[in-house]
Image (cartoon, rainbow, N blue to C red):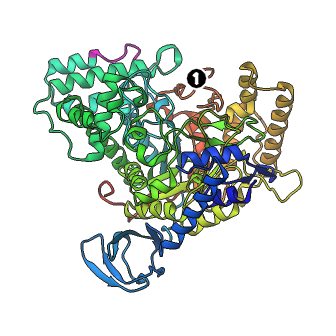
Amino acid sequence: MDAALRALAAAHGVATWYEDTERRRIDVADDVVVAVLAELGVDAGTPATVAAGLSDAIARRGRVSAPDPLVVRAGETPTIGAPGELRLEDGTTRHVGHHLPDDLPLGWHTLAIEDRRTTVVVTPSTLPPVPAAWGWMVQLYALHSAGSWGIGDLADLRTLVRGSAELGAGVVLVNPVQAITPVPPVQRSPYSPSSRRFANPLYLRITDTEAFRAAAPQVRAEVEALAPPTGAEPTDGLIDYDAVWSAKLAALELLWRRSPPLPSPPDDPDLTDFATFCALAERHGPDWRKWPAELRHPRAAAVDAARRDDPRIAFHAWLQRLCAEQLAEVRAAAAGMPVGIVHDLPVGVDPAGADAWALQDVLASDVTVGAPPDAFSQRGQDWNLPPWRPDKLAAAGYAPFRNVIRGVLAHADGIRVDHVMGLWRLWWIPPGRPPSEGTYVHYDANALLGVLALEAHRASAIVVGEDLGTVPDEVRTTLRERGVLGSAVLWFERDEDTPGEPLRPPARWPAGAMASISTHDLPTTAGFLRGEHVRVRAELGLLADPEAQRARAAADRAELLTELSAHGLLPPDATEENLVVALHRLLATAASTLLLTSPQDALGEPRQPNLPGTVDEYPNWRIPLPVPVDELLAHPVVRRAVAALRAARPGAAAPRSDRPAGPAT
């Protein structure tokens, strides 16, 4: 690659080469680098524009005396170039010299040097230690009961949390519960929300709302008549998102019309934008990129007119209030747990959805993120999620990222960051190209991790980073230093320093981790034992050599049984049920702080929640649990499976003393 293009790419954080999963250097094609730079607003199409862009980058770097915004750890004293006035978050001011003082309080401050304003974010050096606990990884939609309308809801989750607390569980990790676009077809994947800042009304228990309780008997009867006729049993054994939303929307609209006085429109600008998007989507369709041109930007005059005139905006804001109330009730049910409720933060958002519309000025809207080719996905992966633009995000003082974190933590005791490597770099795929024709774009990880740590500190929340797969040592070292837990999964924990990379004994797993047998994207315990992951993919035509994969699955199963035997845990009667229990006993020997299992793993459910690489070929995110939630914890296999976890992490009698009484601010 031309040296000037390489230098220009480096100046904008665009990688010109990377290491693949086999630690081999892969050079990125020039045209890919040029295309990614173009999405950052940098013209690199000719040698002249490359030279001009590089000259501009060098000049800009020379004019900057300190980063803007400036994100520091508590106690750090970086040079700021000149004396100035620092306005602290509480409104007080301090005169500062050429360095920031070492006693600044944590928070968001503003530094004024002459006519320039710089955001200063003081973040905690590290988060407090996480209490040891066992608990659940829950796919909320999969829960069901006699009172839920064909999909798991927040009342079902509350039931599970209360019952689990009585068993001594200390933590419950919930799949993303962020907002949908409220028109069909409803997005099924919780990892592609319309907004990461607001909640999903699909999970409301309609009959648990104050509006329902206060309604006249006739209205309550009308609402109850709208419930899907299948009750707790989803149609044809799978969850029908569109049918559920249709029924719940009709019920909510009925309560809204019959519940005077109606709330006034919200005064929260972000909520107003979200509710406006929902109202416009109902009129013009779910993809804002196909709306009339005058409605495609949230600050457009036509959108302002809609905000003044559309009564649906108040309705959708009201739905968010209902969600907040029921999410708070779930969190209250976990008040006695050492950790509590941990909510999941997806990598990004639906490019057609609310955040992509409202935050388009800080997103690379035409780009999608994914992963480069590897042994498991030889064509690479495209997750169809638009990334933050690192330059625009920094120019906004990281406030959009902060607001996403606050939205997730508003009703949580912890946050799990999916693909935590995204704080360091993301694989950008330029428009019109396959996943293999992308490259990494780097972010200011110190700033993003600092903002995350600050907001978690303020919410008295733990942070877990999903760091599975090939992750540089420096990333895991930094996470440990900042008090962020990593992830440990039985299928992936291998001793890379030993020939053949055998399974690593759980006693040698990292202590600073949330450990589990599997995840939602991997085979369940029973599915692995049966080889279900190979059978399904072979039937769908997703395997080039099914026989080789069957042989590998058999070898993996044999290796796992050998591991059980080495720990004295291989049952004499090696039935599937006994092996499921034995694998939970193996998990209980892990050194990791948090030990989690899923209802699917503990029940011996063979179907995994999501099969990566498929959309409609497999019922992703649509498979309900085989038993209702009020029978789950009493199920004999579940009781046996979690007994060892309860014995290994018995500390649920000591709730965290730093938990705030209400939502984070």
Residue 268 location in percent, x, y?
Answer: 24, 47
Q: Residue furthest front?
A: 48
Q: Residue furthest right?
A: 499
Task: Find disc 1 in the rendering and name its residue.
Answer: 619
Amino acid type at mark 1: Pro
* Placement of 225 over or under 53, stated as above or below: above
Q: Residue furthest bottom?
A: 97
* Placement of 456 over or under 586, stated as above or below: below
Seen at 62% across and 29% down, the residue is 605
Q: Quadrant of the C terminus?
A: bottom left
Q: Is residue 431 magenta?
A: no
Seen at 57% across and 27% down, the residue is 620
Residue 249 location in percent, x, y?
Answer: 30, 23
* Placement of 226 over or under 411, stated as above or below: above
| Front residue of this view, candidates 396 and 400 | 396
Seen at 27% across and 22% down, the residue is 251
Residue 133 location in percent, x, y?
Answer: 53, 56
Image side of residue 174 versus residue 492, left or right: left
